Amino acid sequence: MNTNVTGLHHITAIASDPRQNLDFYTKVLGLRFVKKSVNQDDPGTYHLYYGDYAASPGTILTFFPWAGLRRGRPGTGQAYATAFSVPEGSLPYWQERLTRLGVKQEQVEKRFNDEVLPFADPDGLRLELIATSETDARPAAPSKDVPAGFGIRGFHSSTLALTDPSATAQVLTKSMGYKLVSESGHRTRYTVGPGGPGTYVDLLTDPALPRGLNGAGTIHHVAFRVADEAAEVAARNILLKDGLQVSPVIDRAYFKSIYYREPAGVLFEIATDGPGFAIDEPLDQLATKLGLPPHLEPHRTAIEAALPKLD
Ligand code: ZN
């Protein structure tokens, strides 16, 4: 028995300035702004979501932006890097584009069979573009800034940095149904469900990495996907039986979620594929109005007045 996770659902990170964050992910990376909402645990701050046109699970990178927040430090005990899948051969385009737009980037490296371009967002969040030779039929996010032939197709992988990977690997493989696919150097890759880009979790045990510190430019949590609420409840029971401390099922309006910390301290979530982001505005108008869960709707006027302007 495992949780029937089918891959990555969304990844949530911490940012500083919301306007800078919006500009970077939409204009530089060419993602679609798919939901403008609030942090349900802190409704005075935004929760911004970027993804593909349909806001599909497996493409959604989200942020809690707190203007003026100090930077954290990516390192062990965290989801260390977030990789997007881009078409094979597209890295020269991205190197030129990122250089032209003043984005800090590192040398292209070879990882397993693919070329990887590491770079950072304005808060220092570690991002990667992986020009994979594997089939990835997901359509690129539509963008007037990035041609479709080079566009981001969703997540490729999430890399967790760990000092000791064994207990984390145990949770991935025993409880969550992940399977080891490749090992090289300090990196071990796992996949689940249908496999391929959008499913991978890499465990990185590089002794040169510092201990991670939370703050702007670090990942808050990694969410995995299950088909529906029945699968969510079943997943919760399996995780509890395997000795993890798991939250109750929480209704996040666009999906239902459970949360738990894997043994190395990284916060995991399992989220349902539905109902999705088109429940409170039409698909062709996503992120036009502030999305609020029903319990915050009575406070809309006050919440909108307190949030910084984004338009
Ligand atoms: Zn989440």
Image: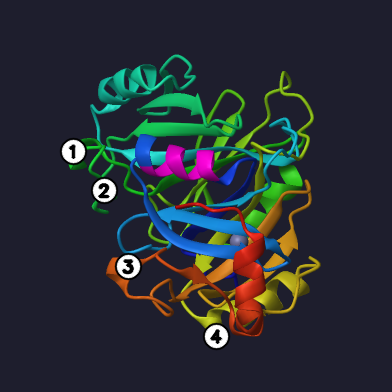
Magenta stretch: give its range. 19-26
- Please name the residue shown 45% across and 22% down the image: 103
- Left or right, residue 144 beside residue 100: left
Label 3 element class: helix
Badge 3 amino acid: Gln
* First along the sequence among labels 1 and 3: 1
Badge 2 amino acid: Ala
Badge 1 amino acid: Gly
Q: Which mark is residue 230?
A: 4
Query: CB at mark 3 closer than 8 A to ligand 1?
Result: no
Q: For the residue carrying disc 1, how many other residues have a C-alpha within 10 Å: few (<14), some (14-19), or many (20+)?
A: few
Residue 243 vertical position relative to residue 213 in the rendered view, above or below: below
Q: CA distance from mark 1 to mark 4?
A: 38 Å
Front position among marks 1 and 3: 3
Q: For the residue carrying disc 4, how many other residues have a C-alpha within 10 Å: few (<14), some (14-19), or many (20+)?
A: few
- Please name the residue shown 27% across and 35% down the image: 133
* First along the sequence among labels 1 and 2: 2
Residue located beneath label 3 in the image: 285
Q: CA distance from mark 1 to mark 2?
A: 8 Å
Q: Which mark is residue 281?
A: none
Image region (quadrant) for ligand 1: bottom right
- Left or right, residue 240 beside residue 30: right
Q: Are marks 1 and 2 in contact (CB under 8 Å)?
A: yes
Residue located beneath label 2 in the image: 140
Residue located beneath label 1 in the image: 149
Q: Are marks 2 and 3 in contact (CB under 8 Å)?
A: no
Across and down, in percent, residue 21 comes to: 52, 42
